[in-house]
Amino acid sequence: MAFLEEKLAEVKKWDLPRMDRSSTSVRYRKEAENKLKLAIKHLAAYIDIHAQGDATKIIGSGFELRKKPGPTKDVGAPRGLSSQSGRLSGEIKLTWNPDRPGIMFVVEMADLIPGTTVQDWSLKGYTKKSKYTVAGLIPGNRYQFRLKAVGPDKESPYSQIIYRMAI
C-alpha cells in the first residue's frame, strides 16, 4: 500500500486550487491521476489472481468485494422497428427504439418470395446500437426483417416483422 500512498501524494501535490490553472499544471495532474488509476488497476488484478476468490484475502488487502450480479430483468422486445433505403444500392437501413441501453440486438432477414408462406430466417448481424444497415441485397427483391434483444442470460421475443424492397 506504500506504493499507492506515494502515488496519491504525487496527485495531491498538484492541487489546482492552490496553483495556477495553466495547461502544464493541468497536464501534470492528469498524468499523475492516470498513473494512480493504473497502479490501482494493477494492484487489484494482482490481488484478484492471488486471492482466487477468497473473500478474507480480498478484504484483508484493503479492497472491497465486487458486487455479485443479481438476476437480470426481462429483456423487452425491441419496439418501433422501421426501415429506409440505404445510401448505396442494395442497402436497407433498420432503426428501432431499444427497451434498455447496453443490450445486444440480433438482426435477422428473410427473402420475401411472393406466393409462399415459408420464412427462412438468416442471421445478418449483431449490434449494440439501435440501428443496423444490411448491405449486399439484390435491388428489386423484397425482404423481411426482425430482431430480438439479448441480455446476459435472457432473450426477448422477436420484434414485429417489417418489409422493404431493396433499391
Image: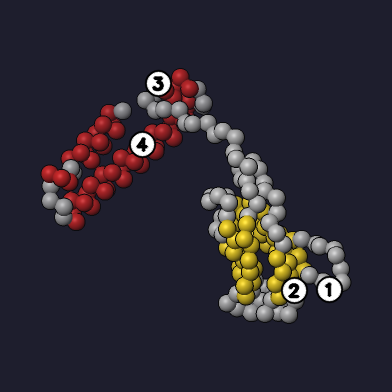
Q: Amino acid at mark 3?
A: Gly
Q: CA distance from mark 3 to mark 1?
A: 69 Å
Q: CA distance from mark 4 to mark 2?
A: 55 Å
Q: Which residue is mark 4?
A: 40
SS of the residue at dot 2? strand
Q: Which residue is mark 1?
A: 114
- Residue at left 55%, top 58%? 129
Q: Which residue is mark 2?
A: 142
Q: Position of residue 121 (x, y in %)?
A: 76, 60
Q: How many marks?
A: 4
Q: Amino acid at mark 4?
A: Ile
SS of the residue at dot 3? helix
Q: Amino acid at mark 1?
A: Pro
N-term-proximal mark, 4 vs 2:
4
Q: Which residue is mark 3?
A: 60
SS of the residue at dot 4? helix
- Residue at left 12%, top 47%? 19
Q: Position of residue 23 (x, y in %)?
A: 19, 56
Q: CA distance from mark 3 to mark 2?
A: 63 Å
Q: Viewer-nearest of labels 4 and 2?
A: 2
Against 74, is 120 above or below?
below
